[in-house]
Amino acid sequence: MDKGYVHLYTGNGKGKTTAAMGLALRAAGHGKKIFIGQFMKGQYYGELTPLKLIQEIEVEQFGDEGCFHKDQMTSLHRDHALKGLDRIDHVMASDGYDVVVMDEICVALWFDLVTCDEVLQVVRKKPERAELILTGRQAPEALYQAADLVTEMREVKHYYHTHGLLARDGIER
C-alpha cells in the first residue's frame, strides 16, 4: 500500500487552487478517486464544469455565493465552514478517496470561520494511503508543520496591480 502525504499550497501568489485542481486531474487520469471540498466558495468557478464531468472527481462547495471580506463574517459563514469540516471528516473516515482537497481552508482559518485545532483534528484523521491537499493564503505555522510538502506561491508581479484587472472568467474564476 502506498503512503499518502499532506500538501500545503499557500502564499500570496496566484495558482494555489489551480495546482490542487491539476493534481486532481492527474490523479483521476490514473483512476484515483478524488473529493474536492471548496471552503468559502458557493458561486460558479470555471473549473466546476469540467471537474463534474469526470467520474472519479466529486466536488462540494461550503460557502455563499459572492465574495466577502473578513469583516463581513456571520454565523452563517461559520456554519458553512463547519459543515465543510464535518463533510471532509466523513470523507476521510470512509477511506474511499485517494485524494482529498480542502480548497481555501487556510482562508477559512484566516477569517476565523474555523480554528486551527479543528482543521488539525481533520488532518490527523487522513487515511494512511490518501493524499490530502490544503490550499489558501495565510496558512498558519501549525499547518506548515503538519504538511509533508509546502509550496508557497509568491507574487512577483500581477496585472491587478499594474493594470487594475479584476478576476477574469476562465483565468482566475
Image (spheres, helix red, strand yellow):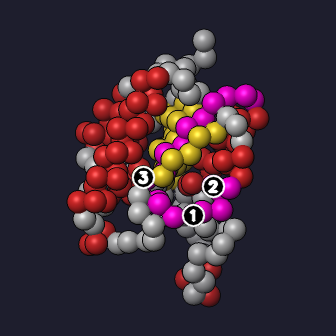
Real-space Cα distance between discs 1 and 3? Answer: 12 Å
Inspect this view and state whether residue 72 appears. yes
Left or right: 86 in relation to 21: left
Residue carrying label 2: 48
Q: Which residues make up the magenta segment?
A: 30-49
Real-space Cα distance between discs 3 and 2? Answer: 14 Å
User: Which is the main secondary structure of the residues drawn in magenta?
Assistant: loop
Q: Residue 44: give its label.
A: 1
Disc on the earlier residue, 1 or 3: 1
Residue nearer the viewer, 43 or 158: 43
The vertical placement of 25 against 173, above or below, is: above
At which x and y percent is residue 80? 34, 53
Judging from the image, what secondary structure is the residue with disc 1 in?
loop
Residue, x 72% and y 46% (percent of image)? 53
Judging from the image, what secondary structure is the residue with disc 2 in?
helix
Residue, x 51% and y 47% (percent of image)? 60
Inspect this view and state whether residue 148 appears. no
Q: Residue 62: give its label.
A: 3
**Amino acid under disc 2:** Leu
Residue, x 50% and y 21% (percent of image)? 95
The quadrant the C terminus occupies is: bottom right
